[in-house]
Each structure stands twice: as C-alpha cells, then as structure tokens.
Image (cartoon, helix red, strand yellow):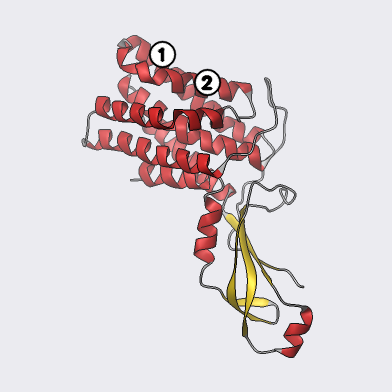
Amino acid sequence: MKRKLLKMATAAVVATAVVVPGAARPAQATDPATIIAVAQFALQAYGYFNSSEDGGMTIEEATSRIIVEIGNTRNTIMAHLDGLATAEARACAEHHLLEFADIEEFSLSLKQRWAQDVTSCVTLINSLWGSVSTLSAKNQLGIALGTVGPIALVARAQARFSTTELKNLLIGAFERVQQRFTPYCQATPNVSEEYWQMYPDPSWVYAWYSCAPAPEPPYWSENIGSYSVYELGLWHWGAPVNYPNWPAVMDGSKRLSAYVVAESALSQLRA
C-alpha cells in the first residue's frame, strides 16, 4: 500500500533549542477538551476587552464579565497552566489568574504595579517560544497566551496605561502560533498497488484522511494528536483526485492544538 502525502500548508518557524532557566520539566500533553475551553474563554475575554474599547461597555463591566468567565473555567485553566514546562511561566500565569478577581479593590497605584507585572508575564511566555524545542512545549505556551493575554490588556486599561503595544505583541504571537500549528495532511488509500494496475482510470475508493498539527522537520517524531476519518474519495494511480471534506478534517486537527486558541483570540484582536 502506497502512502501519499498531501501537504496542505506548512509553518515556517523553526525553533532553536537552548537551555531554559529555572525549574524546567517536559511539557505535558493537553486534553482537547481543555484546548476548546481555553479557546472559548479567549473568544469571550478578548471580546469583552474589545467592547470596552469600542464603547460597548465600560472597562469595569468588561472586568466583571471576564472574572465570571474565569470562575466558570478556573479548574480547566489552572490544570492547563500546571502543565507549562517552566516554573517562571507557571508561577506568573497562576498568580495573576488568581489575583485578577480582586483587581477592582486595588488602588490606582497598585493597579499600575499589577498591570506592569502581568504584562511582564505575557512577555515572558512570549519570549519562551524561542527557547523551547518541542511542539508540546510550544503548544502549552500558545494556549497560555489565551488566558493571560486578556487579563493583561484589561489590567493595563484599568491602570490607565496604553494597550496598543501589548495588543500588537499578542497579535504577532498568535499569528506565529497559527503558523507553527497549521495542519499538515495526508491520505492513505485502502487498496493494494495491484489495484491501480487493474483499474487505471479514476475510481472512488475508501481511504484514511488525516491531519496533524505541523508534523514537519524537525518535528517528524513528535505527535501532539491527529484527526482522521475513513471515507470515500476519488483516486487515480495512488493519488487523491477529489476529496471534498479536507476542510472538516483540517478543522478537527486545529482543535487539537493552540491553533484554535489563536484563531479565537485573533478574531477579536483584529476586529
């Protein structure tokens, strides 16, 4: 059986492995349900921030709604943050997630110090991207930006600081996440080599169609999950000619990585 690879798209980022300071540990795999929960949180939280900027609500209203969203997903988000590979990123993300509920009680001077601290947390997570060498670690960092990013934006607005530069940094970071985890797809027909000799014309055969988040060099040996279906498609001499459901398979793959978190965040940050 001959395996045919279909490269739908690839990412251009190649990471360089260096030593990460602090207590490091292997990044843990993230449950797909957690990824979807964080993506939904990012969609809502960044949306509330946008609305506060556009006059749809006050920054205080946006803050209150984000606090409610955190309350609804706190255990899921905290479980994900615990999987971050570096102690610094875990500590700063968990610290600000826990303290955000009290931000309305802070004095303006405390809000300003807190806003600077949580901004540093975002820039730390962003800077670690180039210091980790595995897809799993990059995946964790990308997901973390979906939780800490909107908190930092709202905190800066509460502190009467500018949010423009941080917003631009987050847009660039999420675009990089999308590029890294753009699905790479392949198809394998469930027929032998002899089949193509017997049926040289295009024919409909069953095949496995699968997509995975960026399993390209130097990551061929890594696997953070793949999405596969077994369906009919039109093939000719071992190559797929027509399979209309590739978009659905690619979407399934996106939900297995930080890609879907970045997609949710960017839909609001670019609005």
Mark yes or no: residue 59 visible: yes
**Left or right: residue 101 compared with residue 83:** left
Categorize mark 1 by other alpha carbons within 10 Å: few (<14), some (14-19), many (20+).
some
| Quarter residue 74 falls in | top left
* Spatial CA span between label 1 and label 2: 14 Å
Going from the N terminus, do you reach mark 1 or mark 2 first? 2
**Left or right: residue 163 compared with residue 147:** left
Circle 1 is placed at which residue position?
Answer: 113
What secondary structure is found at the residue carrying circle 1? helix
Circles 1 and 2, Cβ within 8 Å, touching? The answer is no
**Left or right: residue 78 compared with residue 102:** right
What secondary structure is found at the residue carrying circle 2? helix
Q: Nearer the viewer, residue 125 or 14?
A: 125
Residue drawn at x 58%, y 56% is 183
Residue drawn at x 31%, y 26% is 63
- x and y percentages locating residue 152 in the rendered image: 41, 26
| Quarter residue 28 falls in | top right
Residue 245's disc is none
- x and y percentages locating residue 256 in the rendered image: 56, 48
Mark yes or no: residue 160 visible: no
Q: Is residue 257 above or below residue 241?
A: above
Q: Is residue 257 above or below residue 210?
A: above
Amino acid under label 1?
A: Arg
**Left or right: residue 144 compared with residue 101:** right
Amino acid under label 2?
A: Cys
Residue drawn at x 49%, y 47% is 260
- x and y percentages locating residue 263 in the rendered image: 45, 47
Q: Quadrant of the N terminus?
A: bottom right
Circle 2 is placed at which residue position?
Answer: 92
Categorize mark 2 by other alpha carbons within 10 Å: few (<14), some (14-19), many (20+).
some
